[in-house]
Image: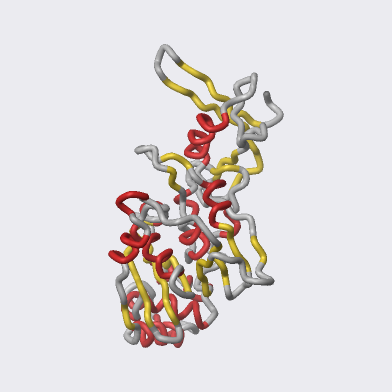
Amino acid sequence: MGQIFHACAFDTQTKTCCVMDADKFHANCYSYCGTVFSIHYLLRQKPYHVMWGGHHVVLDDNVTKFTREEDVLGLSTYLNYEDFEMNIEDLKEKDYYDVIKKIGEHHKQWKRMDVWDEAKKYFEWEKTRSVKYEGYLVNHSKKLAVNLSDYFNRSKYLSGDDWEVAIDVLPILTETGEGAPMALFDGMSAETTEELAGAWCADLLQIVDELPESYQIIPCCFVDLWKRVKYCYPQFGVNDEGYLFHDADGNLFEGVATNIFGKRGETIYNVKVELKPEENKIRYLAVEIGEK
């Protein structure tokens, strides 16, 4: 069936949280999704800890991967004691049983809020179908930042309705595990920063207009290989040999395949574009660099 996720933003001081069912990761991790709208809206108001929480945390001994107090609090926003009790045999004998009890206790204490309607109005969803990729997503826990405009330009593609959309930066940066590979299952652009998946999970985040002093901007990109290819072709075209450009500067597009665990292969590909006018089709071929 696949892992189900919840989008969670939480304030550890006021014990207030916003938790939304996000279904399977690749169903609700995009710039047009209500879950993404809601978290972006909250982060434009004030800092919140963010966790895109998956239910595989309750399986095996996965909970031992979450050791910080903010991790435990984040898990408690969408999981309770019974979730672990139903999935782990001899739970009371586990050396992490006290952590599970703490998750159960915190789960009952949260004050919950719903900002779905406010978020849709704030971003004018009916007109834009997207959150704003302006300003900076900052990580107060790590003193890092992502330039949202740069992220969107590197990660966007066209939807079936010709809207410019993207896998949003928040779900992948804050997921608890195994989500990113589902969104990037068919491969990714070579500049995708998949190693950052989960790196900001439960950290204190905020979206601001000005970069705070001493915060470091990190390069960030998450994009499906073939969706980006189909975006780049009408935007940048091909060279004389039919190979797809990556940008307006004449650099060729590079992509990588992924295995079932979401790990990139060592081979890097260019993409050759073949036009089939008799079939009214365009064919995109991955060509290993060095084998042209």
For residue 228, above or below residue 273 = below
Residue 196's x, y, as percent?
58, 59
For residue 75, above or below residue 242 = below
Q: Residue at x 62, y 34 (%)?
A: 248
Q: Residue at x 62, y 43 (%)?
A: 190
Q: Nearer the viewer, residue 202 or 127?
A: 127
Residue furthest right as drawn: 290
Figure coloring? secondary structure
Residue 124's x, y, as percent?
34, 56
Left or right for 222, reference 182: right
Q: Nearer the viewer, residue 164 or 29?
A: 164
Rendered-image quadrant of the C terminus: top right
Residue 151's x, y, as percent?
55, 52
Residue 72's x, y, as percent?
46, 80
Rendered-image quadrant of the N terminus: bottom left
Q: Nearer the viewer, residue 237 or 174?
A: 237
Left or right for 123, reference 209: left
Could you tell me how many numbered marks the image carries? 0
Residue furthest left as drawn: 117
For residue 117, above or below residue 132 = below
Q: Residue at x 33, y 75 (%)?
A: 83
